[in-house]
Image (cartoon, coloured by chain):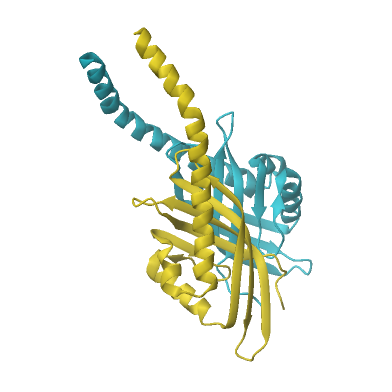
Chain colours: A yellow, B cyan
Amino acid sequence: VKNLALLLAAAVVLSAPAYAQSAAKLTEAVRNADLGWEKVFSARNLDASVDYIAKDGAMLPPNAPIATGQDEVRKFISDLFALKNLNVSWQPDTVEVANSGDLAFTAGTYQMAWDDAQDNSHTDRGKYVTVWKKQADDSWKVLRDIFNSDLPVKP
Amino acid sequence: VKNLALLLAAAVVLSAPAYAQSAAKLTEAVRNADLGWEKVFSARNLDASVDYIAKDGAMLPPNAPIATGQDEVRKFISDLFALKNLNVSWQPDTVEVANSGDLAFTAGTYQMAWDDAQDNSHTDRGKYVTVWKKQADDSWKVLRDIFNSDLPVKP
């Protein structure tokens, strides 16, 4: 019994730094998922962008209905990528992962520019929250992505 | 050693239903937090509404900058509650909690109606994602709340 108690005590003491290291690694993995999605999205790579969406994932764009599942998300991203001279990018400023390492969110800011059918240039900037879920293959995929503009509604 | 192995096996078998029950309880607690916030928010109770925001929490409203921390959130909610004949409500349709029970999100739909200074009536409806964090006192508070309209931008 005494040996067992010592073993348990040692396990607790030894697991603390391992746990902290694991938490930092998890945060890094989720930040890399956000940055990886931004890379393919800003490059307007449709297949790779859709591939970041979980099977039961959704995108929630402003002034449009929710796009649920990879098919509806593909339609939304495809329409977005069809905008003339589209330039879109984002930067995460917050990454938080659950202690269990199965659920996480990132948040940050985005910028967008595009031309309309009349060749008028438009710009937008705003903020986003993305909920991430760790998949069976240890990759992180998007469960919910929602964003909105910082700018007042234009007349 | 044989007794220890049996004990460990028993612990694993017995903990499975306890874990499932605990997960269901966690989901219920987060759903109740969402419903509780909606109750005081729809009743336009400013203090109680702000009290649901975590110390490092934020609200991310459309067409406005992010409101970070309880002071900025209080200003945002206070301005919202000042709208004439404001009627706001929401319903969660998704509740997901991390296995560790420290981080969760809810998502759903909202409805809003109000009158402007010229007594014109306005309505809006849309969707939201709220990220929840369990506090030291076991209550769930809002880390991020973001929403946007389903309706096209009005001219």
Using the rendered view, name the quadrant where residue B10 is placed: top left
- Locate the N terminus of chain A by quadrant: top left
Q: Residue at x 44, y 40 (%)?
A: B27
Q: Is residue A152 visible?
A: yes
- Residue B28, image x and y in percent? 45, 38
**What residue do we see at 65% from left, 45% from top?**
B57
Q: Quadrant of residue A139?
A: bottom left
Q: Where's residue A103, x and y in %?
A: 46, 46
Q: Is residue B112 left or right of residue A20?
A: right
Q: Residue at x 52, y 74 (%)?
A: A43
Can you name the residue that lies furthest to the top here?
A2
Tell me which residue sits at (73%, 53%) in the image: B76
Q: In the image, is residue A39 above or below residue A24?
A: below
Residue reaching furthest left?
A: B2
Counting labels gives 0
Given residues B136 and A134, the one toward you in this image is A134
Using the rendered image of the protein, determine whether residue B32 is visible from the camera's viewpoint: no
In the rendered image, residue A58, in percent from the top left (x then y), is placed at 45, 62
In this picture, residue A133 sits left or right of residue A24? left
Is residue A35 or residue B143 the one in the foreground? A35
Q: Residue furthest right?
A: B117
Q: Tell me if A90 is positioned left or right of A131 in this view.
A: right
Image quarter (top left, top right, bottom left or bottom right) of the C terminus of chain A: bottom right
Residue B147 percent across, percent down from the top left: 59, 59
